[in-house]
Image: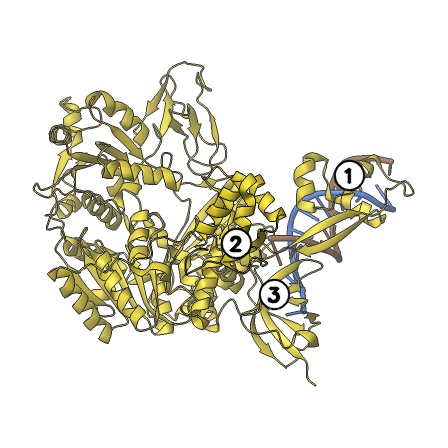
Chain colours: A yellow, B brown, C blue
Amino acid sequence: MSDLYAEVILPLPLHDAFTYQVPGHLESDIAEGKRVVVQFGQKKLYSALVTALSSKKPENIDVKKIYEVLDEQPVVLSKNIKLWRWIAKYYCCTLGDVFKAALPGGLKLESKSKVFAVDDGTEAELTEKEQLLLQQIGSENSTVDELQKKLRNDFSYPVLKSLFKKNCIQIEEKINARYKPKTETFVKLHPEIENKKILNNKLNDLQRAKKQQALLLHFCEKINAFKKDVLLSVSKKELLDGTGFTPAILKELVKKKLVIQFQKQVSRIEEETENSQVSINLLNKHQEKALTEIQASFEKKQVTLIHGITASGKTEIYIHLIDEILKSGKQALYLVPEIALTTQIVRRLKNVFGKKVGIYHSKLSSQERVEIWDKVLQFQTKPENGYQVILGARSAIFMPFSKLGLVIVDEEHENSFKQFDPAPRYNARDMAVILGLQNNAKVLLGSATPSFETYYNAVNGKYGLVNLKKRHTNVELPETLVADVKKAYKRRQMHSVLSPELYELMQGAAEKNEQSILFQNRRGYSPFVECFTCGWIPKCKNCDVSLTYHKYKKRLTCHYCGYSQQMPDSCDNCGSNEIKTRGFGTEKIEDELKPLFPNASLARMDLDTARSKTALEKIIQNLESRKTDILIGTQMVTKGLDFEHVSVVGILNADNLLNFPDFRAHERAFQLILQVSGRAGRKNNRGKVVIQTSQPEHPLLNLIISQDYTSVFKAQMEERKLFRYPPFFRLIKIVVKHKNQQTVDRAAIQLKQFLEKNNKLILLGPEYPLVSRIQLWYQKEIWIKFDKSLHLDNTKDFIIDCVSKTKHLPDNSNCVINIDVDPM
DNA sequence: AGCACGCCGACT
DNA sequence: GTCGGCGTGCTC
């Protein structure tokens, strides 16, 4: 009999799969896509994922055995792993990195070392430190992590090790299941009460215990005991909550053998109680036309872009498409940027598709994520119980779909689809396209301001293109005007940060009881403070940035690492007491507008005021119900706010958008301004947008005013071609990081020298990025541009090789070098 | 990522 | 002479 071997991937940044032997008793349980517990290295246990089985014994390797098979059913399908492999290859990261990103936390396990005291140490000769540690370990068996936290500086690995050597403690690796099904106490009738007659008798017996009788009666009503459709049980919580009955009364009923309590597994996911599914809205003629065009386009093209202006009702078109795919028995994935996961769209989808919809995003607990994951899996075997539609943020591309038929990426231009920091640095929009290709599912990208890469693909025929140029409410697009703040400052016409144009429009709106939205891309009170006497500016001690002043908290905060300190009373440099705030953040604007609009109610929407989901919802609700007259916000206001009574939108400082040092600056500025503008629009009165700038003659502004997407696109394409940027050239960014500045400088230059050996690559840098030091780590970037005709895999392999060579040079091993493919 | 192994400076 | 620092490389 030949032995069985399993290839597994570990949740570690390792390139290769590892082979383990499957012991005989596990041969019938093991399967591809199941998780197994394996030992990797000296002691650590991990949950690894089986990707292949074979009977060939690997040569020259001392294989270890699999300890345990964790799953009864595979948690990942081979077609899902296919996408993982694609991602690892394309984004130059390891399969382990992708594995870590793909599986919900609850399905990833890692061993924790548990420490037991086995000897009180009286026999052995112990140092003072060892005795102290042994006492702390005591009789409880805590994990090493816990000990470390509890003892802080008193903890030391060497002491622990010597205790181990002296046989005073035992260390054991335990793998702990992070996912535990949630259970609740349920109550049902005692099995001895077989019919209504007995029940009635028992009820009569309780004449002298009125409360118990009442509770039993209440219980019977809850389970419909007197009607036809008798429910078997009711949860204790539902039975007692808000009734005034105490658990003690219930306990008496249990004691008298009238009811019994038991534990039952429940779902953590709150289901909408509404059972009645709302029917799908009818589309207007423009939407109908767009839908037909999309369907026709899908006949020919795998991917289609719908370019629909703000408030053109794209969501309803998506719902029609999803409905269609569900009827064909397939699954649909609906991706939205993280912030767009507001209740509005969740509610709409749940109303239409009911229990078929699952929501998946980063705010869910890892336990909740596991449950949603399971329900997507279930669709394969028990479609009626599983999720057929997933509405989610970028990580939803990893869900274990078995019969995917449609992928929708809404607001496809949003850069939050791209993951920045831990690898895999993937773009979920692009991976949605790959996912579609791999599953032969149609992909629909939607945006009012498509990314230029996508639009380029659409006009070149790689993607289908459908336009939707009418707003569904028949509201016209707003009128846009440019306000010259430089001139207004000179003439002393400014009302605080408001140009006379914007001020007047806002006054007019206030008189008509209409709302205004102001956009300023800086949170806090002022982006920096400065000593009036000597010009000293407080900087973060961990990062190369000035500290932002937050007036409400009276603190200076770093927006990169979170470092925060008290606002100083005097200058650290010269001792002067005059420290002035400089520049405007949303908080300061709110402050300054209060006296200008004394009768208006102001609200602010930024990371500080909308940290929690409920806080954000409250702000949106207040705007919806018109409790808020003027909303001041950052990026956040560009998304998902469609309000009928917003008539004025102000972009307070367009300069920093236009002058941002990035090849995509104009694209971004245009998208942002158009998106914010899209919030304006009254039924009977055209909305107004004011763009405040000190360079009113900037060529981009004229194009923005005319809302001329294609002209901006064409102009930008010329520039991108000339300067060899995407979509004409491929772009890879390499970031070298180290705590020591000299090391970064040296390693970056060494890396460049390796890269220069390929003369087909165009290299920029190494240069310090905008913020050269974050969290005590210095960084330098090298940008690589290369022609699309170059062999992609070979070029990437060459780059990976250069990185690895650089890391192996002396003293570079502690350098972190990240490869970012298609950076944003 | 962890963890062991190995090679150099400050202590008994 | 050893203890322990970190730099280097391997883990099925």
Q: Earlier in the sequence, mark 1 or mark 3?
A: 3
Asked whether the residues under the numbered discs 1 and 3 touch, taking CB atoms below 8 Å apart as contact, a structural biologist would say no
Question: Which of the two residues, A299 or A189, is positioned nearer the viewer here?
Answer: A189
Q: Is residue A92 visible?
A: no
Is there one chain holding both mark 1 and mark 2? yes
In the image, residue A714 sits, relative to residue A566, either above or below, namely: below
- Residue A214 in percent (x, y) is at 49, 42
Q: Secondary structure at mark 1?
A: helix
Q: Nearer the viewer, mark 1 or mark 2?
A: 2
Q: Residues within 10 Å of mark 2 (few under 14, many from 20)?
A: many
Q: Is residue A69 visible?
A: yes
Q: Image point 50% across, 68% down: which residue? A: A76
Question: Which of the two residues, A535 or A153, is positioned nearer the viewer here?
Answer: A153
- Residue A91 in percent (x, y) is at 43, 62
Residue A199's label in the rendered image is 2
- Residue A680 in percent (x, y) is at 17, 42
Q: Earlier in the sequence, mark 1 or mark 2?
A: 1
Q: Secondary structure at mark 3?
A: loop
Q: Count the marks: how many?
A: 3
Separation of residues labelled 3 and 2 (CA atoms): 45 Å
Is there one chain holding both mark 1 and mark 3? yes
Q: Which residue is under mark 1? A: A133
Query: The residue under label 1 is which amino acid type?
Result: Leu
Residue that protrudes farthest toward the left in the picture: A684
Q: Nearer the viewer, mark 1 or mark 3?
A: 3
Residue A816's label in the rendered image is none
Image quarter for residue A438? Answer: bottom left
Separation of residues labelled 1 and 3 (CA atoms): 35 Å
Query: Subunit of mark 1?
Result: A
